[in-house]
Amino acid sequence: MQQISRMLMKLFQRARLEKPGQVDPRAAEFTLSLLVAMYDRSGTGYVKTRSAAAALISLSGDTLLAKYRAFFQFYAVRDGKATLITRSALRSLLTDLNQIPAIVGEGCTLSCVEIAIHDCFHGVLNAAIVEEKFLSWLRSEPAVLLWLPTCYRLSATEMVSHQARCR
C-alpha cells in the first residue's frame, strides 16, 4: 500500500506541474482510497500492483486503444519470442476491471467473466492469444467491459465544442 501511495503522489505531483490548478491536492489520497475500496475489501492493507495499474489505466484519459494495449502488457506473459495472454490472465484482468463498476453497485457476476473468456477464446485452439486477437475482441465491446468504452465516449464528448450560438 505504501508503494502505491508513493507512486500516486509522484504521479499527481507531475500532473499538477503539467496542468496547474486542475489537479486537486488530495487526488493521490482520494485515488488510494478508491483503490483500497475496490481491491482491499477485507482490510489486509495489501493491494496488488497489477490490479491498481489496471484501475488507473482504465480511469486514465488515454485512448481506448492505448488502454487496451496497456492491459495486454500488464497481464500477458512472455512465451519465447511471443507475448501472449492466457485464459487465467484474462480472468485476472476482467476480475480486476469488474471491481470498478462494482464499487458503485454495477458489477457483473463471475459467470459474466467466464462467458467473456469463452467468447474471447472462441475458435482458438491454443492456451493463449496474441495481442491482435485480444485487441480485436476488446474492440467488439464485450458486455462485461461495456462500461469502459461508454465512459471513454462520455469523457471525450466533454472536450467537444461547437461554434453554434444559442438564442
Image (tube, rainbow, N blue to C red):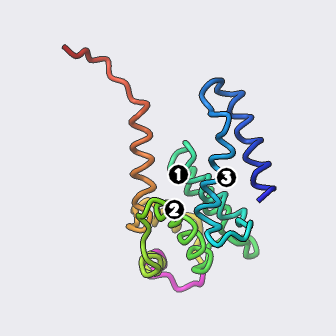
Quarter of the rendering occupied by the C terminus:
top left
Q: Nearer the N terminus, badge 3 or badge 1?
A: 3
| Mark 2 Cα-neighbour bin, 10 Å: few <14, some 14–19, many ≥20 | some
Left of 59 or right of it: where is 16?
Answer: right
Q: Callout 3, which amino acid?
A: Leu
* Residue 25, placed above or below residue 119: above
Residue 86: x, y in percent? 61, 78
Q: Who is closer to the viewer here, 90 or 29?
A: 29
150 left or right of 81? Answer: left
User: Pointer 1: residues within 10 angstroms few (<14), some, or many (20+)?
Assistant: few
At 71% from the left and 66% from the top, the residue drawn is: 48
Q: Are marks 2 and 3 in contact (CB under 8 Å)?
A: no
Instruction: Decide which of 117, 104 is in the foreground and name it.
Output: 104
Separation of residues labelled 2 and 1 (CA atoms): 8 Å
Instruction: Tell me, for residue 135, which label it has, or none.
Output: 2
Q: Which residues are magenta?
A: 119-127
**Mark 1: which amino acid?**
Leu
The amino acid at mark 2 is Leu
- Give the structural element (helix, strand or loop) at label 3: helix
At 67% from the left and 34% from the top, the residue drawn is 25
Mark nearer the N terminus (2 vs 3): 3
Magenta stretch prevailing secondary structure? loop
What residue is disc 1 on?
A: 65
Cα separation between marks 3 and 1 = 25 Å
| Quarter assignment of residue 105 | bottom left
Residue position marked by numbered label 3 in the rendering: 32
